[in-house]
């Protein structure tokens, strides 16, 4: 699971003793809006959507796939309530660690703190690139990037969610897909 962290066997035992494996059925929430986010996790199996619910309409912020970290990280750090939901799109499994346990491990295992810094840096780059893409790329370019980065999993996500994630209507996505099919 954490092949990108170079811990000795004894360090791994200390770190992993705080892990909790939790299973989510399709449709269950890892986090709901207005809940506190006390955990950060690693998706072992399945995948999730992050979304805002505004006047009864889902606005997809993103997706989280296997071998990715999952949390509302700003709420995790600031200890405030989430503004968005995280929901399983299929039966899923996540390895979680509580905030307090993670912060204790920083003191015991400096390599874990380094891992966290790397994760946060990558998350920042990902969020920045998505933000920039709404200004610098067309919806079609964003769609092509999405299907190229997740060719198998993307087929299991409902089209209305993909459209929302891209910031377009389902009809707009349908037109893009038809145009690309003709090419």
Image: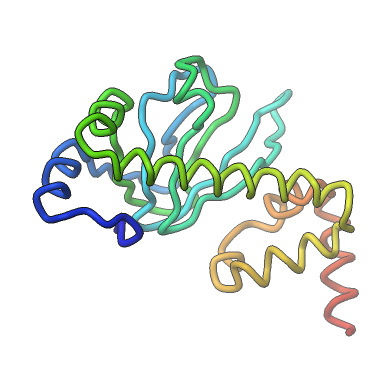
Quadrant of the image occupied by residue 66: bottom left
Where does residue 147 sit, x and y in percent of width and height? 68, 69
Where does residue 61 sit, x and y in percent of width and height? 66, 41
| Residue displayed at 70% across by 37% down | 59
Total labels drawn:
0
| Residue displayed at 30% across by 39% down | 96
Tell me if 153 is positioned left or right of 135 in this view: left
Where does residue 43 sit, x and y in percent of width and height? 38, 51
- Point out the image quarter for the N terminus: bottom left
Colour style of the rendered protein structure: rainbow
Depth check, front residue: 118 or 157: 118
| Residue displayed at 49% across by 18% down | 78
Where does residue 156 sit, x and y in percent of width and height? 56, 64
Query: In the displayed structure, would residue 50 be above or below residue 151?
Result: above
Depth check, front residue: 29 or 78: 78
Tell me if 26 is positioned left or right of 181 in this view: left
Depth check, front residue: 16 or 96: 16
- Point out the image quarter for the C terminus: bottom right
Tell me if 7 is positioned left or right of 83 in this view: left
Outermost residue toward the bottom? Answer: 183
């Amino acid at each position: 699971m954490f092949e990108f962290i170079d811990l000795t066997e004894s360090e791994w035992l200390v770190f992993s003793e705080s892990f909790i494996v939790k299973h989510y059925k399709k449709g269950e929430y890892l986090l709901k809006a207005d809940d506190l986010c006390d955990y950060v996790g690693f998706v072992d199996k399945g995948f999730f959507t992050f979304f805002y619910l505004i006047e009864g309409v889902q606005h997809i912020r993103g997706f989280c796939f296997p071998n990715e970290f999952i949390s509302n990280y700003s709420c995790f750090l600031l200890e405030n309530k989430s503004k968005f939901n995280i929901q399983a799109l299929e039966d899923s499994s996540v390895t979680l660690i509580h905030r307090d346990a993670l912060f204790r491990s920083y003191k015991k295992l400096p390599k874990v703190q380094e891992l966290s810094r790397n994760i946060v840096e990558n998350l920042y780059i990902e969020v920045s690139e998505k933000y920039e893409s709404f200004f610098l790329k067309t919806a079609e370019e964003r769609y092509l990037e999405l299907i190229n980065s997740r060719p198998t999993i993307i087929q299991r996500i409902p089209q209305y969610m993909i459209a929302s994630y891209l910031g377009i209507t389902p009809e707009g996505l349908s037109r893009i897909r038809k145009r690309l099919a003709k090419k």
